[in-house]
Image (cartoon, rainbow, N blue to C red):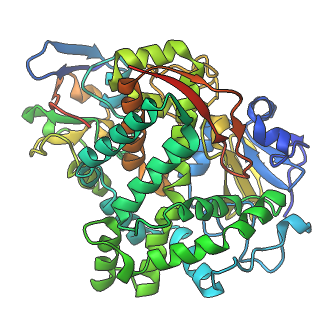
């Protein structure tokens, strides 16, 4: 099971052992991680599961689709080069140790 | 069209008054009968479980929208079923046939025609753009709720939900202030016509003639106030993204059609849920940040839009059940949202649960483009209520709205005490 770390700004990290194939958004919601809202259910429709991906993992993620790209322009906290929607990050063995930094705001 | 005889065939009438006023026992029957059933009354397939509903919503190649979202199939000369209820709608008073054809062209396509329309609406209703309206919408809700709470009692359906949503949509689209209540009758008709041609439907069409005229006038370029989404639509016409002026008007009219009734019905349902669940009301009072999730949980438990249809483009197999081509497939969103296979203790109203798997906004390429706006409207009203009212309770029996598609209250009188 890949371990994923959700790092809140100025808060303690949440380290979660994620089931293979789950999305980072689902893992965060199932574990009650504060700071991921994901209210559309994981369809890239609400931009409220925004994360900043630790640089070293960026290249391991699936490319950004047009839908995700459009939604990333709508995030509550600024979009940065390492911005992704956590509903579009599917956890693989390769992503073990993934670190996702949470933005200040999601809504 | 051959129908698999092994499929469970149910006699329940999804448009009977008994069904419409309390569909939940029927939904359980539907879900437990099987993943796919055949409904004899109007002759179509139906899915009541969450998994199959999601599959139907997300597979437009098989379950197409080009023949409408309703039970009727107005494009066909021969009705699906030889019954008066299926007589195709040829005209709506005040709306010319050409105008109706344009409306269908706007709302029904699947890809590829659907793609540019979808992109345009997603852009105009993007969460980032809606966030720009946030303060104004919160302030409008706060003011309205404060005034209503000061009176000690009010009709939450008419004076709060309807009034609020009409004005938010009016402002955000840029529609004239005078006569905005016409959008209610207009939306009522639009949603009713997706059901059979029953008394409710006929009554609704007859009552909407004046509102069709008002909406038609209000959605013209000359009538649109600058700074809103209406203006964005006509800018798209100018850039050639929308073929012509008349099509631009059709797109603006989609707001009174789809953005008013739906949201106001959901807010009304949320207030009913809160007024009848004091423990949940207390939680919201303690933490108004739960307002947004209370809206989502309301969509799950008491979904406002119930039946939604696709038409099967070809034969297929759905969860092991053979499904013929050329048939209507009914989804019951309110049933999927109470599927115990997905939601624990599904009949319980719990504003802290993760209800994000609810399908009230649809799913896939036709899912609601305006969901960020709807959520903001719901959050605004419920948070304002939690701030200004200490208690809320029903003031007598609320009256159900008689409607083929919407499940909500026509009148919802409540008592409140000021915080």
Where is residue B152? Give x, y as percent. Answer: 50, 27
Where is residue A6? Give x, y as percent. Answer: 20, 22
B347 horizontally vs A85: left or right: right
Q: Quadrant of the C terminus of chain A?
A: top left
Residue visible at 83% across and 67% down in the picture: B86
| A99 and A69: which is toward the camera | A69
Residue visible at 50% across and 63% down in the picture: B256
Q: In which quarter of the image is residue B73?
A: bottom right
Q: Is residue A18 visible?
A: yes
B271 horizontally vs A70: left or right: right
The relative height of residue B179 versus residue A17 in the rendered view (above or below) is: below
The relative height of residue B2 versus residue A80 in the rendered view (above or below) is: below
The relative height of residue A55 versus residue B55 in the rendered view (above or below) is: above
Q: Can residue B244 be seen in this view?
A: no
Residue visible at 69% across and 76% down in the picture: B92
A1 horizontally vs B90: left or right: left
| B173 and A90: which is toward the camera | B173
The relative height of residue B191 versus residue B159 in the rendered view (above or below) is: below
Residue visible at 81% across and 40% down in the picture: B19
| A92 and B146: which is toward the camera | B146
| A2 and B87: which is toward the camera | B87
Q: Quadrant of residue B59?
A: bottom right
């Amino acid at each position: 099971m890949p371990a994923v770390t959700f790092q809140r700004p100025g808060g303690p990290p949440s380290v979660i052992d994620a089931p293979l194939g789950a999305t980072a958004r689902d893992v965060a919601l199932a574990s009650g991680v504060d700071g991921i809202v994901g209210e559309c259910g994981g369809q890239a429709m609400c931009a409220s599961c925004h994360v900043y991906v630790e640089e070293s993992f960026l290249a391991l993620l699936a490319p950004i689709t047009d839908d995700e790209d459009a939604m990333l322009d709508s995030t509550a906290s600024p979009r940065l080069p390492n911005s992704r929607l956590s509903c579009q990050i599917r956890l693989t063995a390769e992503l073990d140790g993934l670190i996702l930094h949470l933005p200040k705001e999601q809504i | 069209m051959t129908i698999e005889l092994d499929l469970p065939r149910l006699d329940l009438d999804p448009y009977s008054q008994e069904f419409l006023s309390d569909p939940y026992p029927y939904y359980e029957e539907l879900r437990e009968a099987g993943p796919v059933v055949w409904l004899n009354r109007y002759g179509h397939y139906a899915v009541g479980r969450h998994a199959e509903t999601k599959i139907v919503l997300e597979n437009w190649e098989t379950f197409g929208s080009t023949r409408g979202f309703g039970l009727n199939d107005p494009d066909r000369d021969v009705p699906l079923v030889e019954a008066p209820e299926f007589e195709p709608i040829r005209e709506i008073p005040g709306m010319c046939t050409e105008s109706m054809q344009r409306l269908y062209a706007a709302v029904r396509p699947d890809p590829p025609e659907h793609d540019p329309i979808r992109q345009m609406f997603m852009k105009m209703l993007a969460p980032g753009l809606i966030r720009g309206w946030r303060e104004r919408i919160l302030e409008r809700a706060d003011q309205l709720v404060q005034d209503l709470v000061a009176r000690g009692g009010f009709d939450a359906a008419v004076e709060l939900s309807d009034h609020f949503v009409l004005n938010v949509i009016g402002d955000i689209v840029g529609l004239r202030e005078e006569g905005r209540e016409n959008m209610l009758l207009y939306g009522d008709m639009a949603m009713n016509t997706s059901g059979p041609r029953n008394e409710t439907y006929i009554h609704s069409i007859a009552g909407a003639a004046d509102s069709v005229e008002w909406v038609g006038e209000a959605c013209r370029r000359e009538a649109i106030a600058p700074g809103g989404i209406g203006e964005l639509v006509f800018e798209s016409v100018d850039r050639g993204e929308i073929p012509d002026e008349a099509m631009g008007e059709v797109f603006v009219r989609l707001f009174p059609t789809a953005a008013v009734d739906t949201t106001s019905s959901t807010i009304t349902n949320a207030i009913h849920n809160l007024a009848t669940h004091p423990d949940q009301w207390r939680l919201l009072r303690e933490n108004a940040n739960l307002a947004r999730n209370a809206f989502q949980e309301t969509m799950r438990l008491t979904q406002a839009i119930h039946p939604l249809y696709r038409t099967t483009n070809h034969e297929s197999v759905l969860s092991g059940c053979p499904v013929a081509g050329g048939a209507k497939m009914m989804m019951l969103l309110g049933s999927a949202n109470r599927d115990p296979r997905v939601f624990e203790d599904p009949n319980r109203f719990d504003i802290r649960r993760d209800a994000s798997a609810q399908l009230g906004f649809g799913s896939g390429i036709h899912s609601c483009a305006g969901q960020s706006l709807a959520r903001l409207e719901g959050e605004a009203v419920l948070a304002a209520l939690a701030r200004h009212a200490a208690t809320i309770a029903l003031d007598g029996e609320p009256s159900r709205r008689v409607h083929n598609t919407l499940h909500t209250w026509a009148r919802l009188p409540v008592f409140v005490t000021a915080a």
